[in-house]
Image: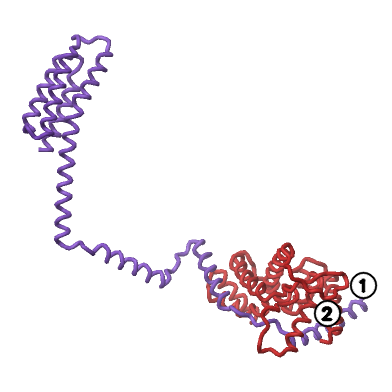
Chain colours: A purple, B red
């Protein structure tokens, strides 16, 4: 394009732009609505980008109010029906529950003892060189006796000390029937006695 | 706003000062909105895109180095977003179309022809007709010519700056502007606007 043609085109463009500006003025674009909405959305974006770069966000007042209301509601719910009398009752229930748990643990330990001993005896039977031949009939009799004693404990016919004594007898009879180890029985016996003491 | 003031505002905005963004929005939103309205022909699209432009600014201003070409940078974001929107809209054409007698047989949608669903009740009827005629004429322009002539009007950039922003030679940009203005004048004179 020659310089003249270029200049000519520029002059025509300038004239055209002046004309368009006048038309645009007569025919404006519709007014912009929601400028505040744009600003609000941009502020949120700025906040989020600031958080992404490690800044601590400012807590919004509405959030603070919501948290306060939630805490108040929680306090109201927790406080309802929990006066001094209720709190005392609650303590009593907890104490009884704890004692019940201990007693139940002792009973379970007593019940499991013969089963575990029997199982131990069976395992001992797998050992290659027992020094004394096992006497299953005697063992079973001891276990039966222990079981009867525990049942009487459960039915409340006998005192715990008496039953522990029976248990001692049963354990002794089992010891006599086995020679592979006394350590297991000793440890077991200690556990049972400790559990019974705790329950008592 | 002087370039020094603008540079200061940009610096504050890069430090995520919300007030600086408010001032930038106040300064450029009206022109950007007019530009986006003329490109899309839809008030809703223009307002939606305006928000997108500033959100894009928030996300990308960190990497912007101010060298006196902030306006071009801003309008380039707006142009790209508007192009995407128009492209998406063309892929999902509206069912209602308005035949405007385009010689090439091009069909112009209601949305492209202007926001006719919400006429301003207080405006005189003549103004509505003029807006409609102008928008129809702008919509008939090829996209590249429409962008050049609207960028000139709303951004105030020189042809050289537009060339740089659009990545086209200066001669091409001048020719597009010249052709677009000639066509607009011809079409609007035919409609007696």
Residue B68 vertical placement versus A117 (above, below): below
Q: Name the residue carrying label 1.
A: A1
Q: Position of residue A120 (x, y in %)?
A: 23, 20
Residue B105 vertical placement versus A134 (above, below): below
Return the residue nearer the eye: A12 or B52: B52
User: Could you tell me which secondary element the residue under label 2 belongs to?
Assistant: helix
Residue A133 vertical placement versus A186 (above, below): above
User: Could you tell me which secondary element the residue under label 1 belongs to?
Assistant: loop
Taking A14 as reference, is A91 left or right? Answer: left
CA gap between label 2 and label 1 equals 24 Å
Q: Position of residue B126 (x, y in %)?
A: 75, 89
Q: Name the residue carrying label 2.
A: B184
Q: Quadrant of the C terminus of chain B?
A: bottom right
Q: Residue at x 63, y 71 (%)?
A: B48
Residue A199 vertical placement versus A32 (above, below): above
- Say few, some or many: other residues with alpha carbon within 10 Å of mark 2 (under 14 / 14 to 19 / 20 or more): many
């Amino acid at each position: 394009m020659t310089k003249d043609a270029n200049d000519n085109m520029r002059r025509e463009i300038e004239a055209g732009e002046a004309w368009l500006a006048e038309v645009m003025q007569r025919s404006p674009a519709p007014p912009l609505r929601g400028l505040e909405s744009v600003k609000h959305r941009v502020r949120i974006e700025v906040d989020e980008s600031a958080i992404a770069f490690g800044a601590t966000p400012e807590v919004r007042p509405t959030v603070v109010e919501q948290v306060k209301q939630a805490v108040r509601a929680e306090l109201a719910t927790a406080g309802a029906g929990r006066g001094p009398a209720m709190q005392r009752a609650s303590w009593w229930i907890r104490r009884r529950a704890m004692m019940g748990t201990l007693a139940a643990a002792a009973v379970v330990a007593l019940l499991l003892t013969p089963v575990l001993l029997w199982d131990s005896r069976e395992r001992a039977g797998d050992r290659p060189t027992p020094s004394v031949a096992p006497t299953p009939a005697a063992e079973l009799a001891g276990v039966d006796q222990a079981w009867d004693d525990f049942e009487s404990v459960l039915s409340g016919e006998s005192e715990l000390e008496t039953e522990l004594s029976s248990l001692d007898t049963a354990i002794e009879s089992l010891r006599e029937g086995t020679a592979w180890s006394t350590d297991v029985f000793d440890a077991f016996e200690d556990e049972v006695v400790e559990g019974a003491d705790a329950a008592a | 706003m002087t370039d020094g003031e603008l540079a200061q505002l940009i610096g504050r905005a890069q430090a995520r000062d919300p007030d600086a963004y408010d001032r930038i929005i106040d300064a450029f939103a009206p022109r950007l909105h007019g530009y986006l309205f003329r490109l899309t022909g839809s008030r809703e699209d223009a307002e939606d895109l305006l928000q997108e432009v500033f959100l894009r600014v928030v996300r990308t201003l960190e990497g912007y180095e101010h060298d006196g070409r902030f306006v071009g940078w801003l309008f380039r974001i707006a142009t790209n977003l508007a192009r995407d929107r128009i492209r998406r809209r063309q892929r999902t054409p509206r069912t209602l179309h308005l035949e405007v007698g385009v010689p090439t047989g091009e069909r112009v949608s209601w949305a492209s022809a202007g926001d006719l669903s919400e006429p301003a009740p207080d405006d005189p009827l003549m103004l509505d007709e003029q807006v409609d005629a102008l928008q129809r004429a702008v919509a008939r322009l090829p996209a590249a010519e429409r962008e050049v002539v609207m960028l000139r009007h709303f951004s105030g950039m020189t042809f050289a700056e537009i060339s740089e922003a659009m990545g086209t030679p200066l001669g091409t940009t001048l020719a597009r502007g010249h052709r677009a203005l000639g066509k607009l004048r011809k079409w609007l004179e035919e409609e007696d606007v």
